[in-house]
Image: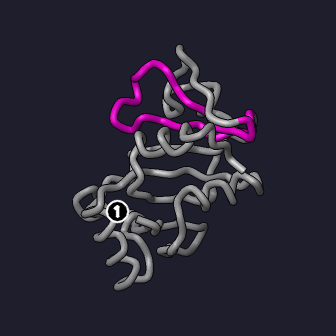
Amino acid sequence: MNRIIVMFQEDDVELNMSFYDYVEEQYRHAKPIIAAYVTEKEYKIMAEQIRTKGYLTERMPRATRKDLGYEKYRYLLVYNYAGNNICIANYNDFNQRGSYTLDEEGLHYHKDGLQFPYDRSVRYTVSWGIKIYTTETYEDVICHYTQLGMKIR
C-alpha cells in the first residue's frame, strides 16, 4: 500500500505517499516523528474517520480503545535526535533483545540493544511532532532497509 495516515499538531490526513519516502524526508529535515503499525482493517477504519469527521478519534479526550477501532501503540520507529538516527522497534515484542537503528550509513543491528520504548537512553531523547500510521510491518521495514544495503537518503 502506498498510503499513510499522518497526524500533525492539529491536522490528520491520509497521504498518497510511500511510508519510506515520507520517513526519509522527515529524517533529512530532522523532524521528530514516531510511526505505528496498523492492520489493513484498522487503516480503513482510520481513513473513514478522517473522511467523515476530519480527524482521528484518538484526538477525543475520553476515547477508549473500543471507540478508536485501532491500536495506536504498536510503535514501529521513532526519530532519536540525540543519536540523529531512527530507532526501529518490534511492536510484537518490546521485550525482545536486539534492536535496529537507521542513519545515513544504513541499517545497524545492536545485539544487546533494547527496543526503543524500553531503552532509557532513547526514551528520554525522543519527542515527536508527527505521528505516522502505516500498514508496513516490522519485518517489511527491516527487509526494505537491508535490500541491497539501502541507506536512508
For the point 40% across and 23% down, the residue is 95
In the rendered image, which quarter is residue 105 located in? top right
Q: Nearer the viewer, residue 5 or 129?
A: 5
Q: Which residue is mark 1?
A: 62
**Which residue occupies the foreground of this view, 3 or 61?**
3
| Direction from residue 44 to residue 13 in the image, left or right | right
At 75% across and 54% down in the image, what residue appears? 28
Identify the secondary structure beneath mark 1: loop
Q: In this figure, what is the number of numbered marks?
A: 1
Quarter holding residue 51: bottom left
Q: Name the side, left or right, on which 28 lies relative to 101.
A: right
Residue furthest to the front in view is: 148
Colour treatment of the image: one colour
- The range drawn in magenta is 83-105
Q: Amino acid at mark 1?
A: Arg
Q: Is residue 115 above or below residue 44?
A: above
In the depicted view, which residue is nearer to us: 100 or 62?
A: 100
Q: Residues within 10 Å of mark 1 (few under 14, many from 20)?
A: few
Q: Where is residue 126? Give x, y as percent.
A: 64, 41
- Whether residue 149 is situated above or below residue 18 in the rendered picture: above
Q: Is residue 27 magenta?
A: no
Quarter of the picture holding the N terminus: bottom left
Vertical position of residue 59 compared to residue 142: above or below: below
Q: Position of residue 72 (x, y in %)?
A: 38, 53
What residue sits 62% from the left and 34% below the top?
Answer: 107
What secondary structure is the stretch in magenta mostly built from?
loop
Q: Position of residue 140 (x, y in %)?
A: 43, 45
Tell me where residue 29 appears, x and y as whole percent. Answer: 77, 57
Q: Is residue 104 magenta?
A: yes
Q: Residue at x 35, y 55 (%)?
A: 38
